[in-house]
Image (cartoon, rainbow, N blue to C red):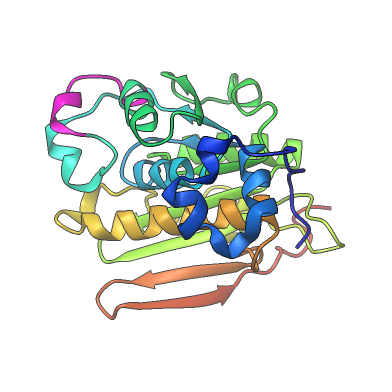
Amino acid sequence: MKPLVDPIDALAPEELVRTARSAVLAGIGEEGQRRLAAARVAVIGAGGLGSPAILALTAAGVGEIVVVDDDVVELTNLQRQILHRVADIGAPKTASVVRAAADLAPAVRILAHSVRLTAANASELLAGVHVVVDGSDTFQTRRHVAAAAEAAGIPLVWGAVQEWHGQVTVFWSDPPGGAPAIRLGDLFPEGTEGDPPTCEQVGVLGALCVQVGGMMATEAVKLVTGAGDPLLGRLAAVDALRARVTEIPIRPAIGAHA
């Protein structure tokens, strides 16, 4: 798939020698790394799915990360939110994100919004982003995110975890190359909520949140750089009990977008 983002002219010398640049991202090449440096990715929710996604995107050197979360760090959530630490308890999650990103990759700019994304502010919060990664904790918020992304033609990386199972896919209302549009309503028709998009019930299975959040970040990297084959029209179903990931096709709902 064609890369979403044009590369910057050159990486700063200190960026070239960072471990994430020279080793982890070697497979996408120097040009792919420059595309990441030019990208703006929005992450909705900095909790169980959002925190590993933010860590991965920061380590990858995404130029700007827009983080939207209205909650604070809680002790009971630390087991499944690897971005945050004990010293962050009681602080806004967005403030914790800024601290962690500064420690890991000072060149990455974090645009933090300590608000709940709603139908009224979604378009403003997502303005100018290349990819949206949705790890928010209610399906109502998920629908607001999807509506804004669909209206703007922005690819939406969607993930959810419930108990032993996880899901990752990409919705895109205006994909390139004549690919069929895939929207949230194709998987969850209006009036249905599907599986709760939350890590709340996973208990000690915080590792599953980390896995799914990392997969979501990988999809964003693939979209930005043009590497690999994003999960557009396919759902990656993660079964932690069987240590298995299965891809399931998603087809546009007939007549849903006429």
Whether residue 89 is in magenta: the answer is: yes
In terms of image quadrants, where is residue 119? Answer: top right
Residue displayed at 44% across by 62% down: 167
In terms of image quadrants, where is residue 29? Answer: bottom right
Q: Is residue 42 at all visible to an observer of this figure? A: no
**How far across and down, in percent of the image, does residue 16 sit?**
54, 44
Image quadrant containing the N terminus: bottom right
Q: Is residue 31 at all visible to an observer of this figure? A: yes
Q: Residue furthest right?
A: 178
Q: Which residues are magenta?
A: 85-94
The residue closer to the viewer here, 23 or 61, is: 23
**How far across and down, in percent of the image, does residue 70 sit?**
37, 22
In-image side of 67 versus 71 (left or right)? right
The residue closer to the viewer here, 80 or 54, is: 54
In the rendered image, the vertical position of residue 167 relative to residue 203, given as above or below = below
In terms of image quadrants, where is residue 252? Answer: bottom right
Residue displayed at 62% across by 60% down: 28
**How far across and down, in percent of the image, does residue 169 sit?**
55, 60
